[in-house]
């Protein structure tokens, strides 16, 4: 049994959805999974197991930031998970991404310490699994949900003191910033698993008045999460 996720091997099946907030994990599990059960609540990292489209799925809290997320990702893999998708929030760096928009982070700028630790500080370009991204794009179009696909910057500092850093990321093509995507997309290929990251834009960076209300965020989560879950459980294509 892993040290932090105190549950048994196979509890989630082979598919897990990651969220930062335990309240969001509970919302998704109770509203979108069939037969959801709490399988761990150790350290406040609540995890649920249930069914989506007839497939076993876990919804697991990561907490905030790369170090916490990395522990959860490693231990999910120890428990038998082979496909991992993040459903989180992000701050917009671009006029192309507005609060309430759905965003697929196909790649990440790894401006965080966790990703750098895993690759020993070498240049690195974390990339999402194409098959998961492709499935999500298809399902979003079918459902009439607009989903942008692009680059996210991942940082360790929510209240980033770096003058001009957000502008620099935007100038390099990043549409948004978050705190967990790069570690996920770094660890997954190192461990031989598939991963992708889907984000809901919660606000424009440095514009607190643009932040989504709790009710608006709840509605958006329930609209967008089925796209992420459908991509998560989509059948990988083999040559």
Image (cartoon, rainbow, N blue to C red):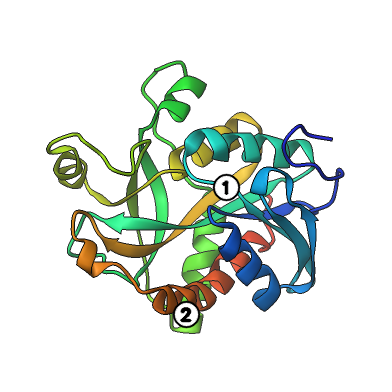
Callout in the foreground (1, 2): 2
Estimate the x, y position of residue 163 in percent, counting from the top left: 13, 36
Is residue 134 at all visible to an observer of this figure?
A: yes
For label 2, the crowd category at 10 Å Cα-Cα, with few meaning under 14, some 14 to 19 and many 20 or more, is few
Q: Nearer the viewer, residue 184 or 193?
A: 184
Q: Is residue 130 above or below residue 162?
A: below
Estimate the x, y position of residue 15 in percent, counting from the top left: 71, 54
Is residue 226 shown left or right of residue 13?
Answer: left
> Which secondary structure lies at badge 1?
strand
- The image quadrant of residue 77 is top right
Residue to which mark 1 is pinned: 195
Residue to which mark 2 is pinned: 219
Estimate the x, y position of residue 112 in percent, counting from the top left: 38, 31
Q: Earlier in the sequence, mark 1 or mark 2?
A: 1
Is residue 56 at all visible to an observer of this figure?
A: no
The residue located at (50%, 40%) in the rendering is 185
């Amino acid at each position: 049994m892993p040290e932090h996720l105190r549950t048994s091997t196979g509890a989630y099946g082979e598919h897990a959805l990651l969220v930062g907030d335990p309240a969001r994990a509970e919302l998704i599990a109770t509203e979108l999974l069939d037969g959801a059960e709490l399988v761990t609540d150790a350290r406040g990292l609540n995890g649920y197991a249930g069914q989506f489209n007839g497939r076993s799925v876990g919804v697991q809290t990561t907490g905030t930031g790369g170090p916490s997320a990395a522990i959860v990702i490693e231990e999910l893999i120890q428990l038998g998970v082979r496909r991992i998708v993040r459903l989180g929030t992000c701050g917009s760096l671009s006029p192309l991404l507005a609060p309430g928009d759905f965003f697929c982070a196909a790649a990440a700028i790894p401006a965080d310490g966790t990703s750098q630790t895993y690759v020993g500080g070498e240049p690195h370009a974390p990339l999402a699994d194409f098959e998961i991204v492709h499935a999500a794009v298809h399902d979003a179009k079918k459902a009439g949900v607009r989903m942008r696909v692009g680059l996210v910057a991942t940082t360790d500092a929510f209240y980033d003191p770096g003058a001009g850093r957000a502008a620099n990321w935007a100038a390099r093509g990043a549409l948004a910033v978050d705190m967990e995507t790069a570690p996920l997309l770094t660890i997954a290929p190192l461990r031989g698993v598939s991963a992708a990251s889907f984000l809901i834009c919660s606000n424009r960076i440095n514009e607190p008045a643009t932040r989504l209300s709790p009710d608006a965020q709840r509605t958006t989560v329930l609209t967008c999460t089925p796209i992420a879950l459908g991509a998560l459980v989509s059948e990988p294509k083999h040559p």
